[in-house]
Image (cartoon, rainbow, N blue to C red):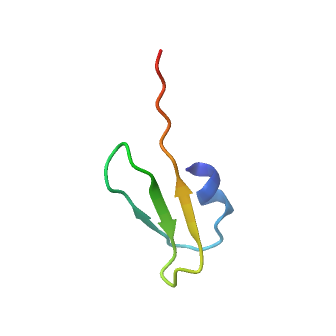
């Protein structure tokens, strides 16, 4: 998620979460871009 936020030049973004095991989206107010952040499960 940090890599996506570093690459965005906007001052504010919207992060949309549904639950802990679903992807989240990062979008701006005008919906000019969408970043999809996928969850990763570690078994160890």
- Please state the horizontal and vertical placement of residue 24, each as a whole percent of the image: 44, 56
- Please state the horizontal and vertical placement of residue 35, each as a whole percent of the image: 57, 62
Q: Residue at x 31, y 49 (%)?
A: 19
Farthest left residue in view: 19
Total numbered circles: 0
Query: From what the image shows, is residue 20 above or below residue 25?
Result: above
Q: Residue at x 47, y 42 (%)?
A: 39
Residue 19 relative to residue 33: left or right? left
Farthest top residue in view: 44
Q: Residue at x 32, y 56 (%)?
A: 18
Q: Nearer the viewer, residue 2 or 41?
A: 41
Residue 17 relative to residue 5: left or right? left
Q: Residue at x 50, y 64 (%)?
A: 26
Dividing the picture into quadrants, the one containing residue 17 is bottom left
Query: From what the image shows, is residue 9 above or below residue 44?
Result: below
Query: From what the image shows, is residue 38 above or below residue 6?
Result: above
- Please state the horizontal and vertical placement of residue 2, each as a whole percent of the image: 58, 50
Q: Nearer the viewer, residue 13 or 30?
A: 30
């Amino acid at each position: 998620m940090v890599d996506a936020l570093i690459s965005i030049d906007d001052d504010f973004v919207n992060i949309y979460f549904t639950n802990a095991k679903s992807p989240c989206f990062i979008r701006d107010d005008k919906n000019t871009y969408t970043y999809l952040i996928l969850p990763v499960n570690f078994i160890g």
